[in-house]
Image (spheres, grey):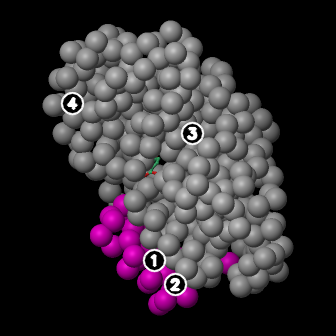
């Protein structure tokens, strides 16, 4: 269950293509059984989320769930997994509660918590001497929780987030917000947008003449899978994320080549997260010999997994969220080049999770 239309369509397509890639590498099998993938377009639409999950588990008789991108929509999947014991692997949505107060033995995430990348960005900014910054985002869980990470990171390094400016998801009427930036007297603007919305925001930020006056940074989604469309508007932008295009490890090199070969597109963080969701599921289903009802077996194996990811190998926290490096990146010539580590082996605080 992923968005294949709307502002996050490209994210869903790359996640799905990478799941297919890993499945193909395994000869289409997990735990000794052939695996059939069912695609459902959730459109990042909250109104249809519960119905979509019920369709997958009912009519489509899905035994395992992989999804989704949007932090609100994912809660319908989390709910279903908690109630029915169906394995759920979240390949993007960073909603904090999924691995904090609503953590569950059957819910796993191969992506991030919204707090993680933004914390790294805030920390890096504070260390560069920024004392005052603002945060601009969509007003929903992902943007708001990332804002908290940004605030925490900045504060830990002696800076302060003095203002948050927001608009409803997935609106793109950025002009009234951009008009306020010069009056804020901040040294930097941090931001969470992604997909089509990020393309437009970064372009309009530059077009408004702000790029050279108040540097724009943020969770790395801002420039992820979007650089070609953003063009010069993104050049030189610094962001923080658990992945970077040029990461120099053998797994990343082979993954990027295989993904390009399969999809005709460059890999990005979304592809990496989808690939790792499939890797984690393979580990679980192999341990359970393909029986999704053998909960103890797949939970134990997935909890203990060490995922050989293109981002660098990672393990899961007790709340089932990746413990991972947050890289500082700079957009150069159409690539998000890694220029340092903003936060090493960063775990989400996991507040309120009492793992069973
Ligand atoms: C989210 O809603 O959790 C979300 C969406 C897109 C991203 C990152 C997080 O790129």
Q: Residue at x 27, y 38 (%)?
A: 166
Q: Considering depth in this image, is 208 or 267 the residue closer to the camera?
A: 208
Q: How many numbered marks, from 0 up?
A: 4
Work out whether mark 1 precedes mark 4 in sequence or the reverse, and give the earlier one: 1
From the Cβ of disc 1, is ligand 1 less than 8 Å away? no
Give the structural element (helix, strand or loop) at label 1.
helix
Residue range highlighted in magenta: 34-61
Residue depth check, mark 3 versus mark 2: number of the one nearer the observer: 3
Give yes or no for contact between labels 1 and 4 (Cβ–Cβ under 8 Å). no
Give yes or no for contact between labels 1 and 3 (Cβ–Cβ under 8 Å). no
Q: Please name the residue that numbered disc 2 is placed on.
A: 57
Work out whether mark 4 precedes mark 2 in sequence or the reverse, and give the earlier one: 2
On residue 233, which mark appears? none
Q: Residue at x 66, y 56 (%)?
A: 319
Q: Considering depth in this image, is 304 or 311 the residue closer to the camera?
A: 304
Gap between marks 1 and 3 measured at Cα: 27 Å
Give the structural element (helix, strand or loop) at label 4.
helix
Give yes or no for contact between labels 1 and 2 (Cβ–Cβ under 8 Å). yes
Q: Please name the residue that numbered disc 4 is placed on.
A: 177
Residue 341 left/right relative to 31: left
Q: Please name the residue that numbered disc 3 is placed on.
A: 116
Rendered location of residue 163, percent (x, y): 31, 26
Q: Can the viewer see residue 163?
A: yes
Q: Residue at x 63, y 20 (%)?
A: 339
Gap between marks 3 and 2 measured at Cα: 31 Å
Give the structural element (helix, strand or loop) at label 2.
helix
| Local crowd size for mark 3, using a 10 Å CA cut-off: few (<14), some (14–19), many (≥20) | many
- In the figure, 21 relative to 146: above or below? below
Gap between marks 1 and 4 measured at Cα: 35 Å
Q: Is residue 129 magenta?
A: no
Work out whether mark 3 precedes mark 2 in sequence or the reverse, and give the earlier one: 2
Q: Considering depth in this image, is 342 or 100 the residue closer to the camera?
A: 100
């Amino acid at each position: 269950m992923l968005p294949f239309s709307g502002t996050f369509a490209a994210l869903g397509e790359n996640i799905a293509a990478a799941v297919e890639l890993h499945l193909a590498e395994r000869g289409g099998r997990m735990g000794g059984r052939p695996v059939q993938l069912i695609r459902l377009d959730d459109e990042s639409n909250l109104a249809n989320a519960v119905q979509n999950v019920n369709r997958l588990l009912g009519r489509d008789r899905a035994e395992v769930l992989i999804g989704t991108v949007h932090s609100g929509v994912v809660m319908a999947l989390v709910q279903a997994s908690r109630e029915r014991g169906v394995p759920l692997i979240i390949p993007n949505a960073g909603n904090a509660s999924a691995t904090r107060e609503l953590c569950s033995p059957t819910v796993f995430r191969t992506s991030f918590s919204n707090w993680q990348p933004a914390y790294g960005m805030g920390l890096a900014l504070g260390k560069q001497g920024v004392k005052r910054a603002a945060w601009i985002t969509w007003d929903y869980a992902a943007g708001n929780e990332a804002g908290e990470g940004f605030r925490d990171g900045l504060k830990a390094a002696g800076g302060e987030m003095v203002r948050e400016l927001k608009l409803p998801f997935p609106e793109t009427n950025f002009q009234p917000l951009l008009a306020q930036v010069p009056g804020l007297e901040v040294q930097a603007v941090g931001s969470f947008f992604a997909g089509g919305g990020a393309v437009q925001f970064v372009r309009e930020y530059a077009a408004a003449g702000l790029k050279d006056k108040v540097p724009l940074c943020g969770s790395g989604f801002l420039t992820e899978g979007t650089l070609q469309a953003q063009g010069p508007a993104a050049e030189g932008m610094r962001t923080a994320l658990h992945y970077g295009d040029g990461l120099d490890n053998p797994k990343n090199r082979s993954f990027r080549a295989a993904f390009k070969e399969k999809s005709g597109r460059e890999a990005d963080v979304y592809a990496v997260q989808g690939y790792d969701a499939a890797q984690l599921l393979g580990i679980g289903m192999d341990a359970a010999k393909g029986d999704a009802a053998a909960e103890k077996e797949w939970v134990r194996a997935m909890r203990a997994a060490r995922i050989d990811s293109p981002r660098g190998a990672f393990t899961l926290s007790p709340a089932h969220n990746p413990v991972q490096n947050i890289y500082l990146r700079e957009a150069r010539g159409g690539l998000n080049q890694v220029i340092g580590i903003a936060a090493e082996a960063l775990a989400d605080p996991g507040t309120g999770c009492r793992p069973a």
